Image (cartoon, rainbow, N blue to C red):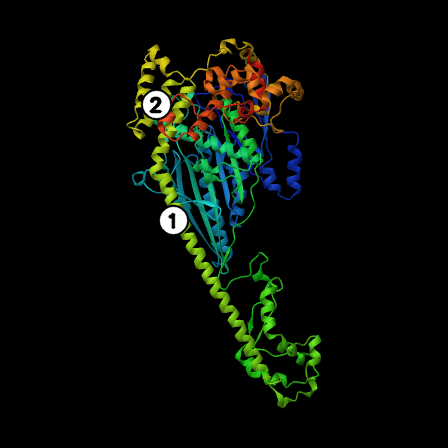
Amino acid sequence: MSVRVVARVRPLLKSERELDVILRTGASAGAAETKSQQSLNGDRKLAALRDRDNVVRIPNPKNEGEEYTFQFNAVYDADVAQQELFDAEVAPTIKHLFNGFDITLFAYGVTGTGKTHTMRGGKSLADRGVIPRLLSGIYRRSRKMEKDSNGETTVQVSLSYYEIYNDKVYDLFEPPEKRTLAGLPLRDNGGKTVVCGLTEKTCTSLKEFEGLYDQANTNRSTSATKLNAHSSRSHAILGVKVTITTPEKTRISTASAIDLAGSEDNRRTENDKERMVESASINKSLFVLAQCVEAITKKQHRIPYRESKMTRILSLGQNNGLTVMILNLAPVRSYHLDTISSLNVANRTRKIEVREVENDPIFKGPARPSARPSMAASRKPLQPLTASVNVNMPAAVAKDPTQKDDDKPLKAFSVYSDRSQPKPVTQIRKAEMPKRTSLSSEAHPIRTLKPPRPTFAPSQAPLSYGDISAARIEEMVEKKVEEILAVRAVSEQSRQTQVHELNEQLQRRLEQLEQRIEGTEDARAEGLSYLLMAKQHHARGENSSALRMYQLALPHFPHNEKLASKIAALKESLHGNSKARQSIAPVSPPKGRFGSMLSLKKEPTLTLGKRQVGDMDDDDVDRVGGGGFSSGEESILPVSKKRATVKALRHRLGDRSALDDYKDPSVSPRTIHLLSIINSRDVSQIKLLKGVGAKKAEAIVDCLCEMDQASLTTADEMISDHPQFQVSSLAELSTLKGVGVRTVENMRNGVLV
Ligand SMILES: Nc1ncnc2c1ncn2[C@@H]1O[C@H](COP(=O)(O)OP(=O)(O)OP(=O)(O)O)[C@@H](O)[C@H]1O
């Protein structure tokens, strides 16, 4: 089953104007069909609840005359009440939770779009959000279940609540002063990511929950930003563990309700230093989430879950059960690009499949047959007979020998063959084969050797073969089987000990590694990431932000002269010292025989201004807000324009010289010049290239900086203005994030030498 993605458009805030509304909602052509199908499937009530719009339309930022259309499972307009959203999207998941499925509900969207309002909501009954309503539903169902079973079934609800703040995990049930610098570590446990040392509180009623939840929320990191007076500065994850115990079994399932922090465009936030760091961390984790979504939908081998704690915990596409994503949207123009970016991520998320697997119950009492066909399942156990049966053995033999039943041997226990595992069976049989033949009631070639049955007189009991009595045979079989079982038990025990020891060793190593990474190396990594951010800001010409980041890095590298002089230079530069500005300016492209950027055609900038939606190709995925436009069928682009673009591209790719250049950069001065511009990491120059806008230029520089970071190990290397990673060919250039063959061709064609 795929992730269910629903969009919710928030109403206008007091500061916003009707005039600026750019989002439109509506129904797609196939919506009616889907609804009638749902009704046919019998879920009429749910179908009625979900009988609503399913499409969001937003204008093309470059051409207001065109609209992009994004289709979701449902779309909730600004006038939709909390209750309505809950009834249609969350209430139906509760029964799955009680059937042993895990459920994940998460709110995603730009800052100030209503995620916290949706998940937590307000204080009044009508304003309550998804989370308190979910708990209310869980308690109601628990009570009913307990009542219907006359108290035989009990349901226990326990809670954990934590936040991921600056990529560190903190327990929200603990006061902030108890937090450690490194936060709580994560572990992989049977395919699930778990937070170690988290408080788990048993909670017996909604009232108790409200007390705990409200108190914990005071521990959550929130602040006022320019875009939201109560902005969440962290991702908050509430885990609701439901344990259902019946006389036979115990089943545990978990509902995770996640209020993600919102992405922020720092050109609009005017964030201070602290907010900036938070914002960088929030944006990074959301960027990783978008990358994970993209990698999953493109079926890539590597999904970068581990690059952020949030994605590791969310494990989108790896988690079992049901997942519902609520995409929160602001309807106004000031969110235009961010909204398109969110719509794209959500659109891709719809295509992610989640395994609909319920958690295994734990049975009480003796071991139950496994649901999975296994050796244990196909094997019938040894069935010991009671002492009284043993006592009656002679009597049984004394029965009328003509009766068919009497042909059956009497034995102290039955041994059944283990068909799918012939080896051990052969072992048992081998040992007893000659004797067993006489005990078998079935036709057997050796049977002829058996003394004729009628010759057995009652006085000859117990049954004997030669000198060996039946009792002796049974005794031998029993002994042999016991021996085999004992050997097996010993080897199983030693195997388990080995596995246990190995697990412990691995655990120890893991802990050491984690301590290294999260402890001592954490500080250094944090310092390096400030330097990376500084570099990225610097490349974009955002010198004051760059300075802030360098200053934040300083405590991590206190004796680094280069860093100190960098900060001094930036300070001077910001104070208008043109000399200093020159010294810290980003690396300019080499002005060699191929000329400077001045020799570039003026055309790229002009083309960019007039660029139409139809000009977008697959390489444009990250053009807007880092999220990119989906090439999927829901992002509707004018088909004729698409065709024209493809045709033009084919024509260009058909150009021999272009292909030659692609293979060998050395052949064309144009190629070398293009690469020098790219390697300059100068956003202001790169964005002038044909087919590259400011966003794409930033994405390219960010990508190069990240590659630098990957190849850099010291702060000195990081501070250095000499980039480490050099793009050396067009092929290499086409592998950068957000760039593809077509973009490269575009860029190259725009370069004039
Ligand atoms: N459906 C809605 N109805 C009424 N008010 C809403 C709705 N959605 C959002 N709001 C209001 O919009 C403002 C921003 O909402 P909220 O704080 O929930 O945003 P957010 O996405 O959680 O932001 P951040 O990511 O910064 O935490 C709040 O004042 C909230 O009350």
Q: Is residue 143 visible?
A: yes
Image height of 230 relative to 657, above or below: below
Image height of 546 relative to 448, above or below: above
Asked which quadrant contains residue 267, the reply is top left
Asked which quadrant contains residue 655, the reply is top right
Q: Which mark is residue 508?
A: 1
Label 2 packing within 10 angstroms: few (<14), some (14-19), many (20+): many
Which quadrant would the N terminus be assigned to in this image? top right
Tell me what residue is drawn at x 35 percent, y 33 percent. 524
Tell me what residue is drawn at x 58 percent, y 15 percent. 749
Q: Nearer the viewer, residue 694 or 664?
A: 664
Image height of 40 relative to 432, above or below: above
Q: Is residue 618 left or right of residue 305?
A: right
Residue 74 in the image, given as x and y percentages of width and height? 57, 33
Q: Secondary structure at mark 1?
A: helix
Q: Which mark is residue 171?
A: none
Residue under pointer 2: 548
> Mark 1 vs mark 2: which is more N-terminal?
1
Which quadrant would the C terminus be assigned to in this image? top right
Tell me what residue is drawn at x 47 percent, y 65 percent. 490
